[in-house]
Amino acid sequence: MKKIQRGFTLLELMVTIAIVGIVATIALWDSSDMLENNRAENYLLELKRNINFARAKATSTDSLIVVCSGETSRIENDQRVTCLNDWSEGSIIVFYDNNGNGIHNPRIGDKILRVMSEIPDNSQFTFTGDNSLIFDASGRVTTNPGIFTYCPNKDNKDNKNNKAMEVSVSGTALYYGDTKNTCD
């Protein structure tokens, strides 16, 4: 007659402990660092697509195309939008500039082509060039180009997840990724 064993084998116990350890690691994992990194990268890559679009639109339509940051409420209400001096404020827009003054004015036929969402409050965004990028019919930037820096956590002093992208005079946007640049 066989004796009935009660309890666990060593293998069953080791597998159970391993599963509990994996579940605990997933539950306690702090993903904020990865989310900051992704947010910064996604924002700059979206900006790069919009800059490339603006350049292509300027060359294909023989028009002046402006990329700048404008007051979000004025953009939503299709009012006249003046480019802000701080790229962290408002929404970044791409628009036709019929009279070449760098101001979106729907009354004279300026048309908004694209609008990016505002950056989150805990992030910061800087540009070393002018307050706008203006593309002429050749696709070149007629304003001072520079480097965009996105800081996904402005309280983080080690600049761990900061990302950078440069816009050249020729109108090309070069994404650099990780940078030690700050947004101060």
Image: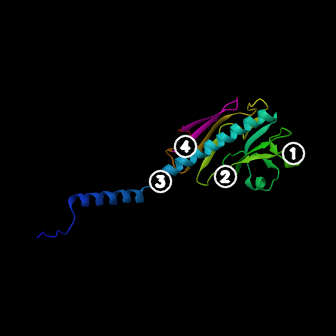
Position of residue 13 measured from the top left corner of the image (x, y, whole percent): 25, 61
What residue is pinned by disc 1?
A: 109
Is 22 situated above or below 113?
below
- In this rendering, the label closer to the viewer, 4 or 3: 3
Marks 2 and 1, how far apart in space? 25 Å
Q: Check disc 3 and give the amino acid type.
A: Ser
Q: Is residue 17 left or right of residue 67?
A: left
Other-residue count near label 3 (Cα within 10 Å), few / some / many at <14 / 14–19 / ≥20: few
Marks 1 and 4, how far apart in space? 38 Å
What residue is pinned by disc 3?
A: 31
Front residue of this view, candidates 57 and 75: 57
What residue is pinned by disc 4?
A: 162
- In this rendering, the label closer to the viewer, 2 or 1: 1
Span shown in magenta: 161-178
Pointer 2 or 3: first along the chain: 3
Q: Is residue 184 visible?
A: no
